[in-house]
Each structure stands twice: as structure tokens, then as C-alpha cells.
Amino acid sequence: MPRARAGDSVRPPGPAARASIAAATALVGLALLTADIGAGAAELKLLPPDEAFRFAARALDTRTLEANFSVARGYYLYRDKISFALEPSGTVLDATLPPGKVKDDEFFGRVQTYRDRVVVRLPLPRSAAGESITLRANSQGCADAGVCYPPHTQSVTLAVPAVDGKAGPLVEFQPAKKSWFK
């Protein structure tokens, strides 16, 4: 291709060249936008589920347990995804959950959710005076950032008071310590 010299007229690019320039500019813009979104997503710090949805429970008396979820700011639990059972028997406890806040959820449709804290009383199917029992809580929740956690299980072992005894202490779920060695 001949080189342009001083005084030569330079023609503006034709339609094909303008289309190529526009396509290249769009690709560069898209790449920059994608890089910017990717950087923002990398900054998103989600809590582990055990921190986002802290579980604790206590025995109130020989026939009643109290379960508590403390939900971190910016997170919520689905009301219909919460259930409780005794281990190792798997006996499902009849939980009467308080009403939640109605939400039109992109994943599950119209649902009730809990934020901040939810407390549930659970009747034991038989008196467990003086026994230790293990309560398993199943739940599922999401972050307001649009990330939902898979169903999650947390368990605590509770000392049930003797007949006419005082309520037991609140026992918080403690996740297993991770170790390189078993």
C-alpha cells in the first residue's frame, strides 16, 4: 500500500471500515465493562452459612425446647425451609413458626422470610427430664447480594432439666474445626 505524503488528500474510511471500527470499539467497551463487573464481584465477601445464620437452642423444661436463629444483616432465612428433628432417631418436631415477612423471591416466588432473629418453641414428643438430647435444625437462606445458600444443617446437644428444674443454658452451634490431619 502506498504511503501518504504531505499534501495528499486522505479519504475518510468507507462503510466497511467504519463498521469494523465500531465493532472493535464495542468489543473494547464490553471487555472493559466485563472487567469492571468482575472486579466488583471479586470484592463481594459472603459470610459462611454458620455465621450468616447463627443457630442456638435451649431446653425450657422437660417438654419444651426453644430454638433461635440470629440472621446477619444483609441476609434472610426462608420460613418454609426451616425444620427441626431429634438425633439420632430423626423424630421430626412439630414447629409452630411465627409469621415471616412476605417477599416476592426470584428463586422461590412469593415466600415468607425472617431477618435479624427468629425464635421457635418446639414441643418434645415425650418428657426427657434429666436427659441430653441433640436437636438438628435444617434451614436455607440467602444474601441480599443475590446469592442463595444450599440447605444447611446445624446441631446442638442440650441438657434437659430435671422435673421442676430451671431452663437450661442457651447452646450455640459450633462448626467443626477444620484440620489438615484427621
Image (spheres, rainbow, N blue to C red):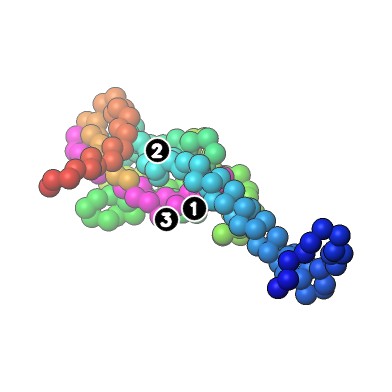
Q: Amino acid at mark 1?
A: Cys
Q: Which residue is mark 1?
A: 148
- Contact between marks 3 and 2 (CB within 8 A): the answer is no
- Indicate the secondary structure of the residue bearing disc 1: loop
> What distance separates the C-alpha of mark 3 from that of mark 1?
7 Å
Q: Position of residue 167 (x, y in %)?
A: 31, 27
User: Which of 47 and 33 lies nearest the eye of the viewer?
Assistant: 33
Task: Give the crowd class for mark 3: few <14, some 14-19, many >=20 residues within 10 Å.
Answer: few
What segment carries the magenta color? 129-153
Q: Is residue 59 magenta?
A: no
Q: Which mark is residue 19?
A: none
- Indicate the secondary structure of the residue bearing disc 3: loop
Image quadrant holding the N terminus, namely bottom right
- Contact between marks 2 and 1 (CB within 8 A): the answer is no
Q: Residue at x 40, y 55 (%)?
A: 151
Which quadrant of the structure image shows residue 12? bottom right
Instruction: Identify the mark nearer the N-term, 3 or 2.
Output: 2
Q: Which residue is mark 3?
A: 150
Q: Amino acid at mark 2?
A: Glu
User: Which of 103 and 145 lies nearest the eye of the viewer?
Assistant: 145
Q: Please tell me whether residue 5 is drawn above or below residue 82 in the rendered image.
A: below
- Contact between marks 3 and 1 (CB within 8 A): the answer is yes
Q: Please tell me whether residue 11 is drawn above or below residue 178 in the rendered image.
A: below
Task: Give the crowd class for mark 1: few <14, some 14-19, many >=20 residues within 10 Å.
Answer: some
Q: Which residue is mark 2?
A: 51
Q: Residue at x 37, y 41 (%)?
A: 50
> What distance separates the C-alpha of mark 3 from that of mark 2?
14 Å
Q: Residue at x 35, y 36 (%)?
A: 56
Residue 46, visible in the rendered structure: yes
Q: Amino acid at mark 3?
A: Pro
